Image (spheres, rainbow, N blue to C red):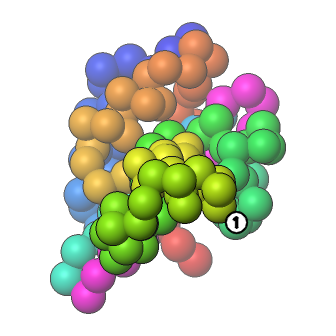
Amino acid sequence: MALTNEDCERIERALDSSDFVMVYLKIDDREITLRWALKTRFERMVAILVEGKMESEWAEGNSPESKYWRSTTGFAYSAKDRKTMKRMSKASLKRRGLNPNERVNYYSPYFTSYKTLLAHLKSFEDATLTEVGFIS
């Protein structure tokens, strides 16, 4: 059973209530935890933990755990490198196998808005809200 609108409102209220709250969900018989993480000194975002863990290997999308994270597309090279590549000749870029506009897909455990987080969680058919608690 997918998350209901009441479940989504409860998740949002719980996360708004404290920086130390944790929301537990059950998806595909796995425990998914939502908790706050700091983005910058003054900004925060919601982090998703799978079975209480967050592994960097999941960001590549090769593991089954990455489906619980946010899918993102970005440039393969930094803006500075792309600017340098655009000054190179097309032949030189081709010879080196470089494409300044190349994009890569990666997965991030962080959500900066409730709207995208809840839409992502609703996409799972068997997502259920199990518990709302505090960090001990």
**Label 1 secondary element:** helix
Q: Residue at x 52, y 33 (%)?
A: 129
Q: Position of residue 3 (x, y in %)?
A: 45, 21
Front-most of residues 56 and 135: 56
SS majority, magenta: strand
Q: Is residue 47 above or below residue 13?
A: below
Q: Quadrant of the C terminus?
A: bottom right
Highlighted range, magenta:
27-41
Q: Residue at x 34, y 62 (%)?
A: 86
Q: Indicate whether 96 appears above or below 31.
A: below
Q: Residues within 10 Å of mark 1 (few under 14, many from 20)?
A: few
Q: Where is mark 1, residue-wise?
A: 56
In depth, the one of 20 and 126 nearer the eye is 126
> For the residue marked with disc 1, what is the amino acid?
Ser
Tell me if 95 is positioned left or right of 2 in this view: right
- Examine the structure image and report whether residue 74 is included in the region drawn in magenta: no
Which quadrant does the N terminus fall into?
top right
x and y, in percent, of residue 116 in the image: 31, 37
Residue depicted at 43% across the width and 60% down the height:
89
Residue 38 counted in the magenta span: yes
Residue 101 is at least partly visible in this image: yes
Residue 101 in the image: state x and y as whole percent.
Answer: 41, 48
User: With respect to residue 15, does 65 lie above or below?
Assistant: above
The count of marks equals 1
